[in-house]
Image: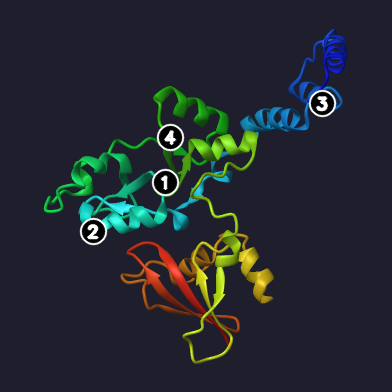
């Protein structure tokens, strides 16, 4: 913390600089960057994040569809409880049962609480989901932040130019562009350590169990591979890109380079766990 004299000097210096008002955004940003000797480093970093927000498109901060944990509108609540618990999320996009590319609602986990006491209740997600908010991939992050604030909403569905769901963005995602990574009690600090583990149950050597959310870059670094992450970012996304749309993801086998990938766990639209075998 600065002492009183340092703070006084800093304010005098800042007033002197502001005697000539910046006329462009770049001049204002440079003024902030040049003020490192007057302001705390975290304050400067936050101000820089605010200035960069209008230039950041939502596609750059969203969670891609391949990484979304989603539900279907005809799912029954008792059947999805474990998914909700394991994910530790509080909001879930809900896809149409007739049009699997279309999000029709958002389910808030807190809306389930009144029904948990009655285990015999046959209630579907459709009965409790809320109206979703949609934003285009090209939307500016500052505009979406303002929209979420004005509508008191914490999540928006991101769509591409054809109206197809391409991902989701949360209020936290955008705020992290300003203040940096926000970790809560559910965040796993050592998450990368669990992305790739040796498959001790496999009879063949050179076999690993891989979380579908594993970044391709991390997979390449750990296992000395060279898969491209130009179009997709995760191993699950890489395999979905290879096989396209299939009726049953679980059990699918994909040959890539000198590797054989088997989808061990998946639901109708998302891969969760992969077995990777080096040939």
The CA distance from mark 3 to mark 4 is 32 Å
Callout in the foreground (3, 4): 4
Q: Earlier in the sequence, mark 1 or mark 2?
A: 2
Q: Label for residue 47? A: none
Q: Which residue is mark 1?
A: 162
Q: Earlier in the sequence, mark 1 or mark 4?
A: 4
Seen at 30% across and 35% down, the residue is 131
The CA distance from mark 4 to mark 2 is 25 Å
Name the image quarter holding the N terminus: top right
Q: Residues within 10 Å of mark 4 (few under 14, many from 20)?
A: some
The CA distance from mark 1 to mark 2 is 32 Å
Name the image quarter holding the C terminus: bottom right
Is residue 15 placed above or below 35 in the rendered structure? above
Q: Horizontal and vertical percent for residue 19?
A: 85, 7
Q: Which residue is mark 3?
A: 30
Seen at 57% across and 34% down, the residue is 175
Q: Horizontal and vertical percent for residue 52?
A: 68, 32
Q: Secondary structure at mark 4?
A: loop
Q: Quadrant of residue 22?
A: top right
Q: Which residue is mark 4?
A: 154
Q: Residues within 10 Å of mark 2 (few under 14, many from 20)?
A: few
Seen at 55% across and 64% down, the residue is 214
Q: Secondary structure at mark 3?
A: helix
Q: Earlier in the sequence, mark 3 or mark 1?
A: 3
The CA distance from mark 3 to mark 2 is 54 Å
Asked whether disc 3 touches disc 1, contact meaning CB atoms under 8 Å apart, the reply is no
Q: Label for residue 79? A: 2
């Amino acid at each position: 913390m600065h002492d009183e004299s340092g703070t006084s000097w800093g304010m005098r210096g800042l007033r002197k600089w502001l005697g000539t008002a910046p006329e462009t955004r770049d001049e204002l940003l440079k003024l902030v960057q040049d003020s490192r000797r007057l302001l705390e480093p975290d304050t400067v970093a936050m101000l820089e994040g605010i200035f960069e927000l209008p230039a950041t498109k939502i596609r750059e901060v969203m969670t891609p569809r391949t990484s979304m944990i989603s539900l279907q509108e005809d799912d029954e609540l008792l059947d999805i409880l474990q998914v909700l618990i394991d994910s530790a999320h509080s909001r879930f996009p809900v896809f149409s049962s007739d049009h699997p590319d279309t999000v029709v609602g958002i389910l808030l986990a807190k809306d389930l609480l009144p029904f948990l006491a009655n285990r015999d209740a046959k209630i579907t997600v459709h009965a409790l989901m809320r109206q979703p908010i949609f934003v285009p991939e090209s939307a500016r992050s500052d505009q979406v932040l303002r929209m979420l604030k004005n509508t008191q909403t914490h999540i928006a569905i991101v769509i591409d130019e054809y109206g197809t769901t391409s991902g989701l963005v949360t209020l936290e995602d955008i705020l992290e562009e300003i203040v940096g990574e926000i970790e809560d009690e559910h965040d796993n600090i050592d998450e990368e350590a669990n992305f790739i583990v040796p498959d001790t149950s496999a009879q063949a050597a050179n076999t690993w169990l891989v979380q579908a959310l594993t970044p391709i870059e991390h997979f390449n670094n750990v296992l000395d591979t060279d898969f491209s992450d130009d179009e997709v970012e995760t191993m699950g996304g890489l395999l979905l890109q290879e096989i396209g749309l299939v009726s049953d993801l679980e059990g699918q086998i994909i040959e890539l380079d000198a590797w054989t990938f088997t989808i061990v766990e998946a639901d109708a639209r998302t891969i969760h766990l992969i077995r990777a075998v080096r040939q």
